[in-house]
Image: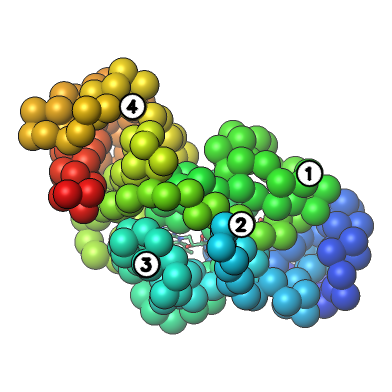
Amino acid sequence: MVTIQNYVRVKNLEEAYTLNQKKGSMILGGMLWTKMQDRTIQTAIDLCELGLDRIDENADAFFIGAMVSLREIELHEGLYAYTQGAVRDALKDIVGVQFRNLATVGGSIWGRFGFSDVLTMFLAMDTYVELFQGGIIPLQEFAEKKPDRDVLVRLIVKKTPGVYAYASVRNQRTDFPVLACAAANVSGTYRISVGARPGKAICITDEEGFLTDGITEERAKQFAKWVETKIPTAGNHRGSAAYRTRLTGALCYRLTKKIGEEQA
Ligand SMILES: Cc1cc2nc3c(=O)[nH]c(=O)nc-3n(C[C@H](O)[C@H](O)[C@H](O)COP(=O)(O)OP(=O)(O)OC[C@H]3O[C@@H](n4cnc5c(N)ncnc54)[C@H](O)[C@@H]3O)c2cc1C
């Protein structure tokens, strides 16, 4: 059970950051992960009055506030069109609609959870994280950093021309993924992001140029085999390392073919 001693609805980000420097303080997202823990929070910091529950877009980027729910992202027409439905595919199996109405993108990205469909998908895109103190940094760099006491303000997804596809394997439809995979061609560079390995998602690019001359059956197979060798996996009660490596190749192959069809 979580016990909260003080609850503060902050008036600005500076107040949130200052309060969060104290040991025992905690920023609240949707609290769905936090409420599973057994702990006392001295000061719970609620960002709900800061207008961070909005997705804005201009010609160059989407700006997704930290308090935007996963459901809002799933239903956002602009993100749907930009990713050819891949973002919706990534989020639709996370527990259920009521859950996704509460879970926030801020909590999901901040947590850097190994099983995260959210991190896996956004890593495949040209995504940046805006931190109150740390400024704007690539999501890849943020994912590799150890959690500190900064405040995640928003995600910025650049509208770099891209083609995307997403798939996960789950033992049961709403369970955590056994493996999650996002494929992309972002501005001519092919990327594969693999999460639930079960470690945190890793994104690699086609540095050997398997797909440089276009996607064919044979090249998709070769690329998938190469990706299998590049992505470390491990075993847990959901699946063995060997099974996850096979899934990595299978999903990579299927998603690469899907991208090829989309491009054709
Ligand atoms: C039972 C269960 C099943 C799940 N299944 C999946 C799944 O299959 N796939 C998947 O991708 N995810 C899954 N999740 C994770 C879920 O989607 C959310 O990512 C998770 O609940 C965190 O989001 P939240 O809004 O609840 O964050 P919270 O629990 O409120 O916060 C999580 C952490 O982030 C910090 N935080 C929150 N917002 C900020 C901010 N703006 N700045 C700095 N720190 C912040 C909090 O202090 C806390 O440390 C699951 C979670 C649960 C509980």
> As rendered, which of 112 and 39 lies closer to the eye?
112
Helix, strand or loop at disc 1?
loop
Locate ligand 1 by image quadrant.
bottom right
Does label 4 or label 1 sit earlier along the sequence?
1
Does label 2 or label 4 sit earlier along the sequence?
2
Residue position for label 4: 206
Helix, strand or loop at disc 2?
strand
Residue position for label 2: 155
Residue position for label 3: 81
Image quadrant in which you'd find residue 40: bottom right
Is the distance from the Cβ of mark 4 to the nearest ligand 1 atom less than 8 Å? no
Disc 4 residue type?
Asp
Rounded to the nearest angstrom, the CA distance separating label 3 from label 2 is 18 Å
Rounded to the nearest angstrom, the CA distance separating label 4 from label 1 is 30 Å
**Eye-nearest disc, 3 or 1:** 3
The reply, left or right, for residue 201 in relation to residue 209 is: right
Horizontal and vertical percent for residue 111? 58, 51
Does label 4 or label 3 sit earlier along the sequence?
3
